[in-house]
Image (spheres, rainbow, N blue to C red):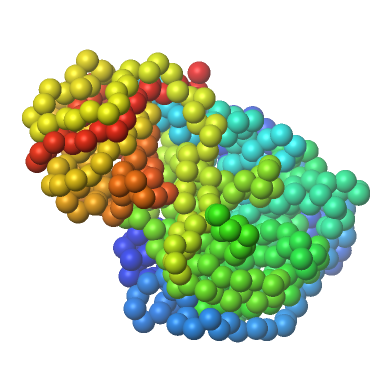
Amino acid sequence: MMFRVLCKRLLPMMLAAGLLLTGCGGADDTDATVTTTGKENGTTSTTAASTAANGSEGSTTATDGDGSISTGGDSSVTSTTSTTKTTATTKPTTVAFKNALKNTVKGNFSTDPLQADGELYGEANRNQFHYSTKFGWGNDPNGLVYYDGEWHLFYQHNTESNYFGRCWWGHAVSKDLLHWEELAPALAPTDKYNIWSGSCVVDKNDTTGFFDGGSGLVAMFTYAETNNNQCQGIAYSKDKGRTWTMIEEPVLYTDGEQAFRDPKVFWHEESGKWIAIIAGGQVRIYSSPNLQDWTLECKPSIWTECPDMFKMKVEGTNETKWVISLAGKGFVVGDFDGKTFTPLTGSVMDEDSPDRYAGQTFFNAPNGRRIEMVWFGSWTYGTELATMLPGNAVYSLPVELSLVKNGNDYKIVRTPVKEIDALRGEKVFSAKNGYVKAGSANLFKDIAAKTLDIELTFVPKGDEVIGFKFRTGTDQEVVVSYDCSKNKLYVDRSKTVSKPKIKSFTRKYNTVIEPDANGEVTLRIMLDWNGVEIFANDGTVMSALLLPDKAADDVEFYVENGTAQIVSLDAWRVKSIWK
């Protein structure tokens, strides 16, 4: 366990250095039902979650010599043909387990004043329009799927503590991608295995034989033994994810490498098979007709964890390409024929963003939409937040992905889903076509706000710095700024941390945002109580958790070093998703 925690806390630095490790499961105060099917000697076994053994996760994986998450220098892959087969024919036995999360009202689980401040969903450090758990640690989003009118968000969740530990698959559902209902845990660790990250699909044609000719949900996830051996298991649900039947024995064992986790599964229409991309180390791609019998197809020269894989149309063309997502921190574009993935790019790494990781897209999203959510957190200081957050599991706003090409370069563009506009409340500011000089009066001097949705478009011309200071009014502030001389966007949260001080919060993050074809830069800033996400015109996203004083709610718009040409500036308050 300690090895895993140490590895996880070092993970952002290891990403930059090219060394990678991984992530880990439920929540609500109601009962859930889980069924486990044992296959040994034709017998059936059941396991209560309370008997689960502690385990550890986080083994270091190989990288290219330049120390980055990488693809091979050429477009070669290694093709293999080996098959692992399993069956699941014994009658399952159902066992009910009590959710470990018994106390969700503030004050019942902590004497820390930051956690005891406020009613449930109204605590000082509770985000108001980002989903978070009632209580407990959480990390990787798992099993994102749309089915029968509901968006399902599963995630790694320790229901017993705000610190990392034994994880379940937490579960929340939404009708609109905004308002989430936290349900009972979906999948529980057993006495033999921990349940780590994975994905969920809709088996609409009953390829598994689990649904009596109908359809249902199938989850594929990593079974992790206490000795850190990793293999893949499956479970299925006939009632929209409320109860699950777990196939107790793995359906896919490691091919010899210990780092073998985070399966992302999808249906490949052209070959008529399920495809699973599995990593933790080198990427491996498998195929299956029924989610139970798997054939290893290829091993591209790509290293990551929490992989995703999907086909996208290149915007403005008739061209389609396949994308392998590197934990939501980067991507590789290539071609895929159901057997071989041929990279067309190297690893393209995304912006310098402190709190975006383990991104996954929804399976079966309507109208061909490609929608992604990520863990709004970090292994670097996650445990330090345990006494500061009511629920130490926060997830990003959902974004819609598109693929653009400029010459030979590809870019994943992330845009907030259109549904988010429904959260806009009172419009508190609006101005167009003007100039603001350095030292001018604060345009937002009469606005006090802890949540804002801001759209700012300007023309960078010289050395001016254009920015906002949020959550001011005490000795704290959050600064979001753009330096026109460098074409760089900055996020500085160094003055927002209530004690104890978190060292990693002192860093000033930045990324390059070039003006668009009209010579303009557009920023959409989504400020929440406990975090900020900034979306730039080129599809870049920066996300940062915040820990400001409760009383700090002033806002300042400022310009330094000259005069800023403002095309438009609009701001709205944001409605709470909890009310």
Picture layout, residue 97 above or below residue 324:
above
Residue at 38% x, 22% y is: 572
Query: What count of labels does the image hold?
Result: 0
In the image, 300: left or right of 410? right
Apparent side of residue 471 relative to residue 66 in the rendered image (left or right): left
Q: Image quadrant of residue 233?
A: bottom right
The residue positioned farthest toward the right in the image shown: 213
* Residue in the foreground of this view, choosing between 5 and 471: 471
Give the percent coordinates (x, y) of residue 351.
35, 55
- Residue 504 in view of the camera: no
Q: From the image, which quarter does the N terminus lie in?
A: bottom left
Left or right for 555, reference 101? left
Nearest the eye: 21 or 4: 21
Where is residue 179? Give x, y as percent.
56, 28
Residue 520 pos. (x, y %): 31, 44
Task: Write the residue at 79% across / 55% down.
Answer: 37
Q: Position of residue 408 (x, y in %)?
A: 46, 69
Residue beneath the point at 91% across and 48% down: 212
67 and 393: which is toward the camera: 67
Question: Eyeballing the image, is 440 above or below 508?
Answer: above
